[in-house]
């Protein structure tokens, strides 16, 4: 007998049928579920996406007496639907003791297993101990004909051999797939990892032919981890076929926890096409090792010769460049550390103490390992494009012998126009030199790159895979760039702007986050008295616009010609927005749909909506109508109802932690039930504006005693990117003082308004809305709320 919580008040399972298919996992409380598929009492049937989760411990599930469950037929998971394991509140593991036939799966009809991490810590959502529990139906011997996807933020452990899972592809997106104990997947054709996925081969207990020595591996912002060297098996090795590196930061980890050696042998390793808009040639490769290791490839990557014996896009242990020794991938063991007067084009230079250029220099690569490098108004050409910072913070200064800043210092890749790969594996790199030359810029590593230049730099496309790039507020330099890509879909990256139109080319901006967790997002920060224009803002999965570091009277203004989303599930969160101080303005010609507007959430406010800005632009806002609010405040005896509250006018309070802890009651429910309250604006009673947040139904309310169910809620402990700790103050030496340069004089037409003086541009404000328009606006907000729920 099996008791299922939530079904008939916990009635025994034998007296009821369990229909799985609402998109969630059914909560199990027992230690074993044994059932047949069907529509009778005591049986299980799938009607859509769904599965199981156990609240604690381990629950074994045996269906149809371990006969084959055919995906897409009978009562098992229908075509186009997912098998789900785990819930946000679950802390237990499912022992899947049933057999699955992938049925008619193919590349266009993949079978999907969705994993929800819950509160498992380091445990798996699912363990598969049953040998031959997965099989594919082979239609053509010469071609792969099935695809199995593991999605979500959970983990699936294969602990037994699966010999009938042959000649097909396994895709893992964000989730972790682990092969351990007796697990084998040695007939799979290819493994494709994306969006922060992990594929772990664990041979600490036994060395087996896990992957058949032929499987190809594609890494797109993901990790392959080989874990050998347990007490029972100190030496271990694994063979793979071809390894392809796509966009973002991809990693191979080779770990040995004993006195033995872990070895991974590849047929080849090369870069190839990536996902999304980012070029694969801008992907970054990191090798991480622990203990004795070997990482080798039969075919030597030809890029080593073209880049002077290193790979500017590949690092090892966040410390150095990757080099080669025969067929092995190793750490560079020779750096040029002499004074800059002897630097030559072929040198891979390491700087360990303060140095100053005495003339223009050309080198192959630069490793900043302490001290500083003052360019002194000269040009440093890094021909391979490799620049890595390790150890303490590092400064690229730009001053003459007296300490005065008198002309631009330049860092470029010169005639090669190789991309400049800046790997920041220290906390901060202070860059007073100007990056220019038209090459692409690729930022990797978790540290901060501070741009402090005082002149105009010229770059191609900019790829921020992780960490931060910050424009210094006191510098006047600008950048002309191609497209900007912030985030790689797997980890958080942030671009912080300060000042007016620092990106002077009005580039295309893509904010790229994870499709499976709100933790990792592409972030744009506007830091007070900041204005920036983009020709297009594209949201890929998860993005944040953060109006941070401002003050009352120093508004942030963001102009966007076009706003797009890569899917209907993508979300743009607006953080630290203060009404009438921060603006998000989009051209009317962008033709924003109601669906697109519903994908924008104002943290602490709720739904987004459009209001008139001028004849050519909309403004995207939240909360009450701005003009009606102004009219209401003109009548202090009878202004606004708190049903759609506005925040306190002080930005300091909006940025403080108290915004999420307010307990002021909100009579939203009462307000919407009394429609007469909206017949006249002047009849609305005045109450002080309460502080509020977004709750699961997407409208303003007070903080619930339990965490919000909304994935992007500010109350979630696993929510979007959090406001960073303020960066340390910039060093004062050997940089020198920056010149006072005039602000850019670019004109953007009569539609562009800001807090800066514009005597020739005075757009007339829109007329105040009527009471009927206010009522219709509220009806629309309520309709959208119900739609999104």
Image (cartoon, helix red, strand yellow):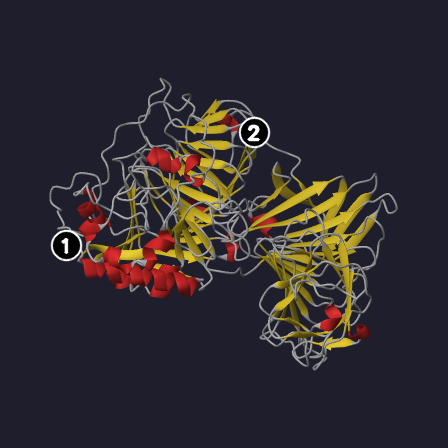
- From the viewer's perspective, is residue 678 above or below residue 719? below
Q: Residue furthest top?
A: 402
Q: Earlier in the sequence, mark 2 or mark 1?
A: 2
Q: Quadrant of the C terminus?
A: bottom left
Give the secondary structure at mark 2: loop
Q: Quadrant of the N terminus?
A: bottom right
Q: Position of residue 135 (x, y in %)?
A: 75, 73
Which residue is at the front of the view, 355 or 72? 72
Q: Which label lies toward us, 2 or 1? A: 1
Residue lying at 81% horizontally and 69% vertically, measured from the top left: 132
Residue occupied by mark 1: 767
Which residue is at the front of the view, 743 or 379? 743
Q: Position of residue 274 (x, y in %)?
A: 53, 59
Q: Is residue 771 visible?
A: yes
Q: Position of residue 486 (x, y in %)?
A: 45, 49
In the image, is 525 to the left or to the right of 59?
A: left
Which residue is at the front of the view, 99 or 185? 99
In the image, is 209 to the left or to the right of 524?
A: right
Residue occupied by mark 2: 369
Q: Residues within 10 Å of mark 2 (few under 14, many from 20)?
A: many
Q: Gap between marks 2 and 1, in whole Å? A: 60 Å
Q: Residue furthest left?
A: 760
Task: Give the numbered dot on residue 300.
Answer: none
Residue lying at 48% horizontally and 51% vertically, measured from the top left: 712
Q: Residues within 10 Å of mark 1 (few under 14, many from 20)?
A: few
Q: Quadrant of residue 110?
A: bottom right
Q: Is residue 417 visible?
A: no
Give the secondary structure at mark 1: loop
Q: Position of residue 661 (x, y in %)?
A: 45, 38
In the image, is 780 to the left or to the right of 251?
A: left
- From the viewer's perspective, is residue 63 above or below residue 647? below
Which residue is at the front of the view, 769 or 765? 769
């Amino acid at each position: 007998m099996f008791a299922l919580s939530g079904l008939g008040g916990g009635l025994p399972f034998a007296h009821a049928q369990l229909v799985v298919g609402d998109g969630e996992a059914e909560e199990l409380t027992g230690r074993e579920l044994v059932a047949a598929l069907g529509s009778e009492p005591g049986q299980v049937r799938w009607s859509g996406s769904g599965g199981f989760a156990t609240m604690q411990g381990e629950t074994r599930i045996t269906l149809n007496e371990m006969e084959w469950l055919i995906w897409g037929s009978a009562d098992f998971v229908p075509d186009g639907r997912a098998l789900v394991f785990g819930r946000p509140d679950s802390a237990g593991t499912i022992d899947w003791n049933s057999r699955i036939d992938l049925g008619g799966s193919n590349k266009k009809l993949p079978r999907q297993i969705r994993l929800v991490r819950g509160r498992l810590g380091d445990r798996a959502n699912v363990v598969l101990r049953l040998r031959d529990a997965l099989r594919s139906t082979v239609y053509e011997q010469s071609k792969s004909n099935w695809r199995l996807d593991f999605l979500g933020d959970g983990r699936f452990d294969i602990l037994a051999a699966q010999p009938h899972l042959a000649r097909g592809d396994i895709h893992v997106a964000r989730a972790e797939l682990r092969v351990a104990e007796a697990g084998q997947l040695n007939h799979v054709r290819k493994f494709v990892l994306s969006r922060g996925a992990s594929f772990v081969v664990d041979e600490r207990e036994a060395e087996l032919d896990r992957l058949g020595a032929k499987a190809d591996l594609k890494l797109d912002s993901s990790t392959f981890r080989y874990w050998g060297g347990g007490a029972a098996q100190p030496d271990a090795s694994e063979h793979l076929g071809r390894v392809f590196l796509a966009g973002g930061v991809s990693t191979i980890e080779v770990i040995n926890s004993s006195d033995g050696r872990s070895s991974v042998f590849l047929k080849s390793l090369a870069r190839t096409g990536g996902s999304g808009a980012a070029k694969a040639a801008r992907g970054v490769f990191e090798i991480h090792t622990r203990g004795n290791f070997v990482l080798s490839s039969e075919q030597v990557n030809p890029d080593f010769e073209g880049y002077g014996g290193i790979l500017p896009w590949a690092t090892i242990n966040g410390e150095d460049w990757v080099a080669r020794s025969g067929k092995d991938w190793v750490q560079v063991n020779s750096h040029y550390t002499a004074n800059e007067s002897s630097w030559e084009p072929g040198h891979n230079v390491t700087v360990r103490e303060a140095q100053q250029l005495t003339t223009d220099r050309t080198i192959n690569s630069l490793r900043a390992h302490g001290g500083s490098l003052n360019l002194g108004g000269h040009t440093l050409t890094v021909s391979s494009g490799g620049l890595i910072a390790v150890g303490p913070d590092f400064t690229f200064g730009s001053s003459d012998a007296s300490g005065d800043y008198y002309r631009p210092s330049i860092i470029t890749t010169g005639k090669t126009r190789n991309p400049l790969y800046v790997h920041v594996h220290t906390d901060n790199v202070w860059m007073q030199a100007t990056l220019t030359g038209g090459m692409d810029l690729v930022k990797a590593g978790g540290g901060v790159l501070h741009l402090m230049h005082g002149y105009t730099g010229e770059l191609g496309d900019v790829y921020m895979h992780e960490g931060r790039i910050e424009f210094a507020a006191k510098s006047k330099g600008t950048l002309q760039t191609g497209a900007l890509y912030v985030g790689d879909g797997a980890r958080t990256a942030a671009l912080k702007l300060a000042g007016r139109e620092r990106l002077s080319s009005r580039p295309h901006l893509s904010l790229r986050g994870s499709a499976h967790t709100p933790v990792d997002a592409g972030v744009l920060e506007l830091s007070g008295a900041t204005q920036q224009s983009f020709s297009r803002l594209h949201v890929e999965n998860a993005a944040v616009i953060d109006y941070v570091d401002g003050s009352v009277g120093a508004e942030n203004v963001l102009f966007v010609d076009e706003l797009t989303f890569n899917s209907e599930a993508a979300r743009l969160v607006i953080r630290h927005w203060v009404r009438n101080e921060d603006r998000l303005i989009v051209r009317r010609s962008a033709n924003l749909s109601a669906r697109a507007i519903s994908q924008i959430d104002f943290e602490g406010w709720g739904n987004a909506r459009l209001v008139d800005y001028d004849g050519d632009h909309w403004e995207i806002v939240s909360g009450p109508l701005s003009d009606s609010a102004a009219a209401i405040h003109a009548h202090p005896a009878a202004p606004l109802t708190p049903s759609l509250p506005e925040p306190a006018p002080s930005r300091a309070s909006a940025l403080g932690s108290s915004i999420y802890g307010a307990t002021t009651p909100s009579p939203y429910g009462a307000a919407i039930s009394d429609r007469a309250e909206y017949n006249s604006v002047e009849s609305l009673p005045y109450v002080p504006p309460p502080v509020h947040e977004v709750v699961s139904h997407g409208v303003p309310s007070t903080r619930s005693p339990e965490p919000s169910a909304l994935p992007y809620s500010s109350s979630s402990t696993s929510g979007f990117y959090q406001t960073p700790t303020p960066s340390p103050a910039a060093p004062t030496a050997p940089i020198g003082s920056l010149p006072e340069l005039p602000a850019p004089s670019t004109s953007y037409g009569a539609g562009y308004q800001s807090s800066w003086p514009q005597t020739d541009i005075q757009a007339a404000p829109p007329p105040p809305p009527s009471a009927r328009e206010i009522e219709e606006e509220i009806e629309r907000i309520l309709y959208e709320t119900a739609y999104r729920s």
